[in-house]
Image (spheres, rainbow, N blue to C red):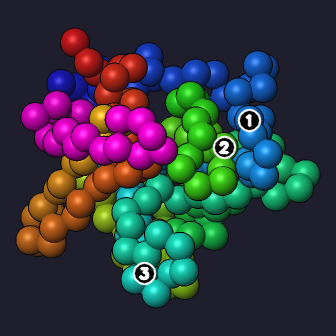
Amino acid sequence: MKSEDVLASVQSALLPLEILDGANEIKREGQRQAAVLMPLVLRGEWHIILTQRPETMPSHPGQIAFPGGKAEIGETIAQTALRETEEEIGVRAASIELLGRLPSFNAVSEFRVTPFVGIVSPQADITPDPREVESVFEVPLAFLMDPDNHIRRDVFFDNENHVLYDMPYDEPGGRHRNIWGMTAMTIYRLWQRGFET
């Protein structure tokens, strides 16, 4: 598939940047607003930029994640995604073109998460903050949008059955990355909305 056709499929999955229906607002007591950025970069073909958290982190150690975090007072939820991306991997807002967002959702933690999708300039300098990011890596979007690479996992949580999908990936250098949890399900939602046939 040509890069412009892939991008058209991505864009077809997205909601507008402006949130008019309050979808990102907290839905339960004690919840906080948060945002993540699914960064796309074109290097011959489209890739998604992902981070791996250090094993020393107090929460979600070692997990694979998008840049993101909780909203600060006075910023829009889109600004949260951009600020966190700069703080975690050093990519400035000027190097990111936000395309839109995926539906907000309640995370298992206390956050109401809004995922944004944006294009990162291939020339952008990626400098991870070692306190929050052990490594940054890229996975071809074609791999993540291939349903053969979505490994179903049934879990029982909070008195309900849930179907999750993991996306294990072996880098060309041989390192194994298991993309799972909220990150994998956000990618899966992009596939459902823009690529599922």
Q: Nearer the viewer, residue 144 or 126?
A: 144
Q: Which residue is drawn at the image coordinates 74% and 49% (left, top)?
A: 31
**Numbered disc in front, either 2 or 3:** 2
**Numbered disc in front, either 3 or 1:** 1
* Secondary-structure class at tag 2: strand
Q: On the image, numbered disc 2 is attached to which residue?
A: 112
C-alpha span from label 3 to label 1: 30 Å
* Secondary-structure class at tag 3: loop
Instruction: Classify 113 as above or below 67.
Output: above
Q: Is residue 189 left or right of residue 173?
A: right
Percent x, y of residue 28: 75, 40
Say what amino acid the circle numbered 1 marks: Lys
Q: Is residue 189 left or right of residue 104?
A: left
Labels 3 and 1: the sequence-earlier one: 1
Q: On the image, numbered disc 3 is attached to which residue?
A: 54
Residue stretch in magenta: 141-161
Say what amino acid the circle numbered 2 marks: Arg
